[in-house]
Amino acid sequence: MSAILEVGPFVFDAAHFLPSYKGVCRRLHGHTYAVTVRVRGEVRGSMVMDARALRELVKKVITEYDHKLLVRQGMGTAIREALRGVGVEVEIVELPEDPTVEVLAKDIANKLAQQLPPHLSLEVCVREGFGAAATIVARL
Ligand SMILES: [Zn+2]
């Protein structure tokens, strides 16, 4: 028998901007993100996996983004130095592409996949405020 174990939503706040986007999302702004994670797999010993362990793992991963500025790879150093010059404290997370909700969901999924048992499949849904969400499905 297989089953799906779901944990979340887990909430964090972060700022971002989308330099490649032709619209208001080019501007620096923030979101409250909500992350829900599902793992699917065979039930072994009455569980897909320990829900408490999965919750702790997700919390640890999303803490890496909380109250930080999400930017595209390669932009972090210049932004950090510019903001430091005007007295703004900032912690930056660089993502491989513009930090859209899809890219963020994929980044979270990749970090979780490295730490989950290989017999499970994984879904990571990230909600960006009330307006958009992306779900990444990954096979471990
Ligand atoms: Zn946004």
Image (tube, grey):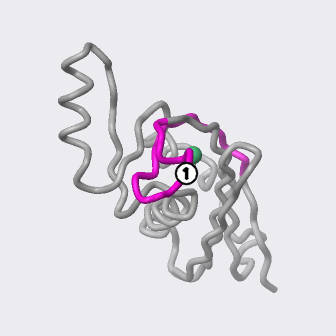
| Residue type at numbered disc 1 | Gly
* Image quadrant in which you'd find residue 10: top right
Residue 8, given in percent of the width and then of the height, sits at 72, 49
Residue farthest to the front, as pictured:
22
Residue 24, given in percent of the width and then of the height, sits at 56, 45
Please give the name of the residue rendered at 64% of the width and 55% of the height, measured from the top-left corner. 126
Please give the name of the residue rendered at 50% of the width and 66% of the height, measured from the top-left corner. 106
Q: Is residue 122 above or below residue 30?
A: below
Query: On the rendered structure, is 29 left or right of 37?
Result: left
Please give the name of the residue rendered at 65% of the width and 48% of the height, measured from the top-left corner. 128
Q: Which residue corresponds to mark 1?
A: 23
Report crowding for label 1: few under 14, some 14 to 19, many 20 or more residues within 10 A (C-alpha): few
Q: Is residue 82 magenta?
A: no
Residue farthest to the top, as pictured:
87
Query: On the rendered structure, is 79 left or right of 23?
Result: left
Residue 67, given in percent of the width and then of the height, sits at 48, 30
Q: Nearer the viewer, residue 33 or 18?
A: 18
Q: Is residue 18 magenta?
A: yes
Q: Is residue 119 above or below residue 57?
A: below
Q: Is residue 29 above or below residue 88?
A: below
Q: Nearer the viewer, residue 131 or 109?
A: 131
The span shown in magenta is 8-28
Query: How many numbered marks appear?
Result: 1
Classify the position of the N terminus by image quarter: bottom right
Q: Nearer the viewer, residue 139 or 33?
A: 33
Please give the name of the residue rendered at 70% of the width and 71% of the height, measured from the top-left corner. 48
The residue tagged with tag 1: helix, strand or loop?
Answer: loop
Residue 28, given in percent of the width and then of the height, sits at 46, 36
| Label 1 CB-ligand 1 distance < 8 A | no
Q: Nearer the viewer, residue 124 or 95?
A: 95
Query: On the rendered structure, is 5 left or right of 56?
Result: right
